Image: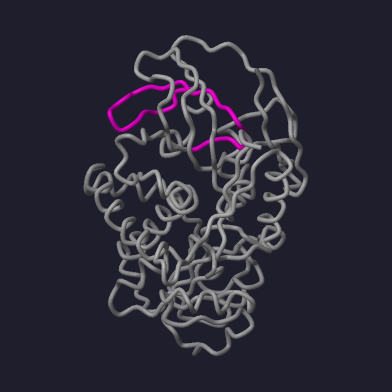
Amino acid sequence: MSTTTLLVRRDRLDQTRIVETPDLPLADGQVRVRIDRFALTSNNITYAAFGEAMNYWKFFPTAQEGWGVVPVWGFADVVQSLHPGLAAGERLYGYWPMADHAVLEPSRLSVAGFSDAAAHRRELHGVYNQYLRCSADPFYSADSEDVQALLRPLFTTSWLIDDFLADNAFFGADTMLLSSASSKTGYGTANQLAQRSGLQVVGLTSARHKAFCQRLGCYSKVLAYEELDQLPSDLHAVYVDFAGNAGLRRDIHRRFPKLGYSCSVGGTHVDQLGGGKDLAGPRPVLFFAPAQVKKRQGDWGAAELGRRLAQDWQRLLARVGNPDAPWLAAVHHDGAAAVQAAYAQVLAGQGDPALGHILSLSRS
């Protein structure tokens, strides 16, 4: 028995290879899972782009020097267990390698889920080490697995960005500028912000995605990047950067001298990533979602945070799945060649924002 994995060259994200590695016998306390399906979005490209700085390459290490495994979110089934608390056949949601199998070392089991206590993950952030049992997950429904895989981790980030900004009184601003407005994290954030009174939410996007963003109905205004000068320069604004485009960031910092905060979230424009040196106004700050999770767990407790997330998730799910005007349709890519091609497409940023990519290396 072997495991099929997609490897990505760490310093050249456009270079990939498929590898087969023989499976080692399980040790006591371990489980082997078959990864059934996972989503691939610009969020995963961000994991790769910040792989060194944010330790994303460390979650699923590989013995091949210079190559890494991009983490993804999705569903898997336990196929072999040497752990007394988990049986074969149990379905799990969590953070996986781009592979068809994985081995976990469950600890701190509860009705809801468990943590992976593998030695190499103990120093990594605990949010990414949590695995949920679908049988007890309030977010879960079998008929919405594709949407969950595509939007759930992005929704959580969107929800936390909105919560972080509200927690800081929006840094005195009344206008939120969101780049990469067609991205799932972008419009998820806009959907949350749109429920706040007194805020203008402006989506910035490419000209070809402008109509899509307008159809969503969660932006007060949508502008193509080259239309930035249509906004008055005296806005009290916050910039939430999902694109990582250094040129756009520089233009926004220069145009809006009353910019109250510059929040860097992702990097969909991998070839244009840049730092915050020599910028006018506030220095960009990288948003780290687990830090806001930790704060709110302290403020409210984990149960209350989960309740609020689940409540707003159901509201988003209703909008995304509205049969009269759906926001998203899933496209499946099964098998090694299809997964490799889908990765190249998402990396290039040329996809249709109305489509979501669901991948599987265990199906063909």
Q: For residue 359, what is the image quadrant?
A: top right
Between residues 362 and 264, which one lies in front from this camera angle?
362
| Placement of 356 over or under 207, stated as above or below | above
Q: For residue 169, what is the image quadrant?
A: bottom left
Q: Position of residue 265 (x, y in %)?
A: 51, 58
Residues in magenta?
95-118
Q: Position of residue 198 (x, y in %)?
A: 30, 80
Q: Position of residue 86 (x, y in %)?
A: 38, 20
Q: Would residue 68 be found to the left or right of residue 284 on screen?
A: right
Q: Would residue 7 be found to the left or right of residue 168 on screen?
A: right
Q: For residue 61, what is the image quadrant?
A: top right
- Residue 11 colored in magenta in the image: no
Image colouring = one colour
| Placement of 202 over or under 144, stated as above or below | below
The quarter of the picture where the N terminus appears is top right
| Placement of 33 over or under 150, stated as above or below | above
Residue at 54 percent of width and 33 percent of height? 35
Residue at 68 percent of width and 44 percent of height? 339
Q: Would residue 83 be found to the left or right of residue 304 on screen?
A: right
Between residues 129 and 22, which one lies in front from this camera angle?
22
| Placement of 148 over or under 364, stated as above or below | below
Residue at 42 percent of width and 31 percent of height? 91
The quarter of the picture where the C terminus appears is top right
Q: Position of residue 31 (x, y in %)?
A: 47, 19
Between residues 243 and 309, which one lies in front from this camera angle?
309
Number of dots carrying numbers: 0
Residue at 55 percent of width and 90 percent of height? 230
